[in-house]
Amino acid sequence: MWEYTDKVKDHFLNPRNAGEIEDADGVGEVGSLACGDALTLYFKLDENKRIKDAKFQTFGCASAIASSSALTEMIKGLTLEEAKKITNEDIADFLGGLPKEKMHCSVMGRDALEKAIANYLGEEEKRVEGEIVCECFGVTDQEIERVVRENNLSTIEDVTDYVKAGGGCGSCHEKIQEIIDSILGREHPVKKKPAKLTNIQKIRMIEETLEREIKPALKKDGGDIELIDVDGNTVFVRLHGMCATCSKSQVTLKHYVETKLRELVFPELEVEEVQQ
Amino acid sequence: MKVIYVDNNATTKVAPEVLQEMLHYFSEFYGNPSSMHSFGGQVGLKLKEARAKIANLIGAEPDEILFTSCGTESDSTAIRAAIISNPDKKHIITSRVEHPAVKNLCEYLSKNGYRVTFVPVDREGRLDLDFLYRNLSDDTAIVSTMWANNETGVIFPIEEIVQVVKERGIVFHTDAVQAVGKVPVDVRKVEVDMLSISGHKIHAPKGVGSLYIRKGTKYSPFLIGGHQEKGRRGGTENVASIIGLGKAGELAIDNIGKESVRVKYLRDKLENEILKRIPNSMVNGDRENRLPNTTNISFEFVEGEAILLMMDEFGICASSGSACTSGSLEPSHVLRAMGVPFTAAHGSIRFSLSVYNTEEEIDYIIEKLPPIITRLRELSPFWKA
């Protein structure tokens, strides 16, 4: 059960200004049936260019209907300049707050208002700006950036609550995190790319790893390891000292050397032992 | 305000007879059933009785009944037991419409070394049996499909599936938490290896469940600890709830008869009247093979949460498969697997009845629901009357 304020419940059960304005000056449509919520906002101006009347039609849950109803009440009597300043936070505040998971309903209200104003001003339907990040809900990087900035969001979950991005398959989470990090000025760790190494580079890295990490460990047990050859992804090594005669050498190789090399050089490596 | 409870696939009322039995086992007979003294021993005897009652409900031997903490634990125990005791097999078959208890476990396993085949369903929610059979392989450790679906009530042909799966020597488990107590379930006739039961779906309390394990099935405990449940599940028994479950099992035998006649009559009346009175409404799921207490109806162009909250104003308790109620932003995975269009999936409502519902209650819903849908449609930009 959602914890809705009395004001949300009131605007849901007794929505203000539901319906259509046939000769509206501005109309804004957002959302879709597929997304689970959609809103069409209409407004009519008076001779002083103030919003005389506003109406809405909403398909959606209780908080979507309440947000739409609240929005129409809020913009009545405002000039378009004033109306433009309304943020999604203002809509939520008007209702005494919305559950965090429902903040996208207030964002939908603001988007519809912007579209309706643009429609009145004769601005061309803005093409989708930016690049689609969330394919499930068709949300772009610019939309995510905006909502993160305006609402001081800091986690992927926040972004999902506000614009739904990341709430479907989840494959865009990394991208959303990058956007959040860049806005918050966080250093984003550059992902190590599985770089194409030349054979020489590969051998050098393997040698270094053997010297630095593996040999010291084996020497503790009185053993040693020698690099014989590298063929593609297969590393041929020879064991010396205690390691060579130890019946556990296979285990040592597979579980220790290979793990270390895969971790520090690259993950596809395989280790083969060359007999004395 | 009077509560009209038609959400019995979510949970049920504890039957008064069940509560009555349980009450003695908190501060009166509180002994540990494993104790050597007779004060604890007498409790052990009550557990034995409860085990026999649950066994009787599904045609099993008492030894084949394990008590757990819930349906989810039963499902997890069954699937994990099968894969642990067949370590060289790395394939699991389940359906796309399972309860999260099975679905999410299988998704987890698919990221941890197992190959999982999710069998699709058709538009009516019927399992694609050929697809299932085609995917059986020597690598398959377990097939787990539900007996009846919690959202639509659609019943799968478990008897037929079991025969094919068993012929291949593969372990078969069924999550029967929605079926037990509503339709006859008999493991002598339908030879499943393991079967999950949940207490709170059959008028026992929450926090108790059971797993049937056919004699001879390879097993490995999920909760490792003491010797309780013959070493098959460690942990001191939830005595009062198990005794309650036993009583509920006894009552269920009687209820199955009522379900198939009276509850079904009420469900059919509710469903038919709604379809008749509300245009652009449709039933989701195979109406031929369905639990007698469940109906899942979609109302096009309106959203489920809004319907639920308006019904809530009248004390009517149901549930929805809409995005806003599923805990995620997408509508129910069951309806999506069935290919129910978005126009309908977001506006789906599940009514699930029990033997405690009355005809007056059903008439009340029939009276209150149509104006709610009309009102929400009037608000909707997609509704063109």
Image (cartoon, coloured by chain):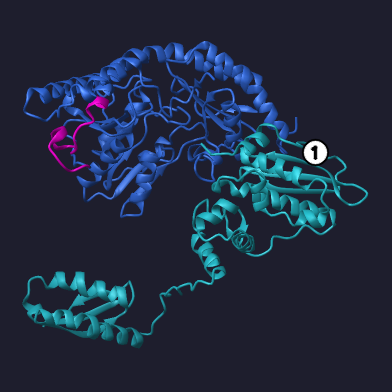
Q: Which chain is blue?
A: B
Q: Is residue B343 magenta?
A: no
Left or right of A1 in this view: A84: right
Left or right of B56 in this view: A125: right
Q: Chain of mark 1?
A: A
Q: Is residue B358 above or below residue B61?
A: above
Mark 1 element type? loop
Q: Is residue B320 above or below residue A43?
A: above
Left or right of A258 in this view: A55: right
Q: Which residues are magenta?
A: B223-242
The image shows residue B84 at horizontal and vertical percentages of 22, 47
Q: Which chain is cyan?
A: A
Left or right of B53 in this view: B343: right
Q: In this view of the protein, which residue sits in the foreground, B56 or B235?
A: B235
The residue lying at 51 percent from left, 58 percent from top is A156
The image shows residue A255 at horizontal and vertical percentages of 20, 69
Amino acid type indicated by mark 1: Glu
Judged from this view, the residue extending furthest toward the right is A47
The image shows residue A97 at horizontal and vertical percentages of 60, 46
Q: Quadrant of residue A39?
A: top right
Quickly name the residue at label 1.
A20
Q: Is residue A67 above or below residue B154?
A: below
Viewport quadrant of the C terminus of chain A: bottom left
Q: Quadrant of residue B153?
A: top left
Q: Quadrant of residue B98?
A: top left
Q: In this view of the protein, which residue sits in the foreground, B145 or A138?
A: A138
